[in-house]
Amino acid sequence: MARYYLTCAIDYANGEPHAGHAFEKVGADVIARYRRSLGDDVRFAIGMDEHGQGIAEEAARRGSDPQAFVDEMANVWGGVWRRLGISNDDFIRTTEARHSRAVVAIIERMREAGDLYTDRYAGYYCVRCERFRKENELADGRCPLHPKREITWTEEENYFFRLSRYRDPLLQHLETHPEFVQPASRRNEILRLLEGGLDDISASRSRLPWGIPFPGAQDHTVYVWMDALTNYLSTTGFPEDGYEDWWPAHLHVIGKDITRFHCVIWPAMLLSAGVELPRTVWAHGFVSVAGGKISKDAGSELNLDELNDRHGKDAFRFFLMREAPWDGDRNFSSAAELLERFDRRYNAELANDLGNLVSRTAAMVHKYREGRALPGGETVLDEARVSSLRAYHDRMEAFLLHEGIEAILGLVRRANAFVDHEEPWKLAKEGESAADRLDSALGALVRCLRSVAAMLGPFMPDKAAELWQRMGGSEGPPTYAEAAAAPVAAGLQAGEAASAATPIDVRKGPSLFPRYDPDP
Ligand code: ME8
């Protein structure tokens, strides 16, 4: 069994979970479930970034002890991810002992490599980015990403990391491993950044007690980004034996605003510590409303739980992945536009196209064949099904999740057109003379819906499992391999014929996606 380890950015515990965070977690969850459906042994880790100045300040503002504050927030965030059906195998919190052990180990290795030294830092610090900023990086005297916040001047004695030493090795790694930073637009940004040269960066803070004590200098804490990035190693058990069962990670899923940390600082830390680099960092784009971050200011209608409950969690997952390209941005002009698009897609693509196809297929199999679909012969729909499976597989392997969904919906539209063209109700009236053709049509539709269920599983786990079971599938989620994906990957042979040769018992049921009427 192939192992596959993937991670998400760990969210700041002082933030509010919003649709942008959900976009990232759902996308990564789709990849995790897709790999599991192929038969991989998957480890999917998400978590919370709980140290740093921003969190210490927020806890103080609420009159709370920082640990009590992050404990409470971890419950809030963990609950949100459960309700969204995120199938993470681990939830790492940077205040856990297993995490500080890993951070201490990596800093010690960086020190042994001669990459740490003390110096005085004098410059700006953006608390929201948890990042040092040079004078020439400011816009109108403020952090360009957080223009509403004052930026603070800081002078302190710090440990520094010799990041500059890793410019050439990183450039070389990006040249020889084009898959390391994806999509290509992000890779180009990192190449430009490296070509511009790298300065050394602070590795510690000397005035901030809310962090992991810096090894050998207890009056310093580890710079929060170096602390946070190490979470990807600490979930594997690093530095204990056995961590290499999961490391190097196959994939880090992050947003485009934090590529510098993941594609420059993190690999440089690993090179310094003599630890292998992750295979790929995927930087998705931003989901925004009116060009800005999705937050409470954008309207209470965009509360994550309300979005989740509007048409059920699977529909919300579908909407996020369908509406926003996984390799780009999606800006909604207003909260109202987002909701309107959500309702429209729900009714058009789920209730009408897919929901009706399921209902009418099951109804016809019951009406004309007592609930049992016979294999019949191959039809044009089988050809369409096979090419959709292939396109889906291709797109998913390239992490183009929105195109994976399009392959599924294309097949659904094709199947509806097939029903309209074949008119099984007329074939049924013709009796014996059209019996074979009716069997072929119904068999092809059921096979098609089984493949749809398998492909849809990563996106809409519960609805896909329901569809799968109605179409004669076993208990549990459909696996892509089971529904003839393996032959697709291998060039299509035996599995196809096998799935076509068995009669399938089809179950009817209530509408999978009841139509939504905003003004009943
Ligand atoms: O950056 N659309 O945490 P965070 C899409 N703790 N993605 C978005 C988004 C939006 N509108 N807003 C945020 C941090 N994200 C650090 C990470 S990792 C070692 C430490 C994404 O809570 C963002 O790009 O600000 C990031 O990947 C994730 O949500 C967490 O953001």
Image (cartoon, rainbow, N blue to C red):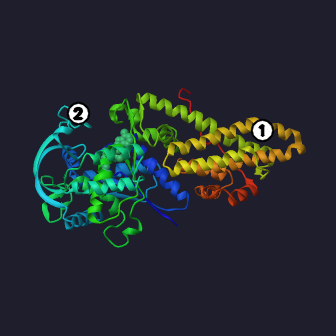
Q: State if disc 2 and disc 1 touch (CB < 8 Å).
A: no
> Among all residues in the image, which is located at the extreme bottom?
241
* Residue 228 shows in this picture: no
Q: Where residue 189 sits in the image (x, y, percent)?
A: 34, 43
Mark 1 CB within 8 Å of ligand 1: no
Q: Residue at x 67, y 43 (%)?
A: 358
In the foreground, 62 or 318: 318
Q: Residue at x 38, y 59 (%)?
A: 278
Q: Residues within 10 Å of mark 1 (few under 14, many from 20)?
A: some
In the foreground, 256 or 48: 256
Q: Is residue 102 left or right of residue 501?
A: left
Q: Is residue 444 left or right of residue 482?
A: right
| Label 1 vs 2, first from the N-terminus | 2
Q: Where residue 43 sits in the image (x, y, percent)?
A: 44, 61
Q: Is residue 161 left or right of residue 389?
A: left
Q: Where residue 271 sits in the image (x, y, percent)?
A: 29, 61
Q: Secondary structure at mark 2?
A: loop
Q: Residue at x 13, y 62 (%)?
A: 218
Quarter of image, res 299: top left
Question: Identity of the amino acid at label 2?
Answer: Lys
Q: Which residue is mark 2?
A: 148
Question: Identity of the amino acid at label 1?
Answer: Glu
Q: Where residue 129 sits in the image (x, y, percent)?
A: 25, 44
Q: Secondary structure at mark 1?
A: helix
What is the quadrant of the C terminus in the image? top right
Between the residue at mark 1 and the residue at mark 2, the CA separation in whole angstroms equals 61 Å
Q: Residues within 10 Å of mark 2 (few under 14, many from 20)?
A: few
In the foreground, 138 or 224: 138
Q: Is residue 413 left or right of residue 284?
A: right
Quarter of image, res 117: bottom left
Q: Which residue is mark 1?
A: 422
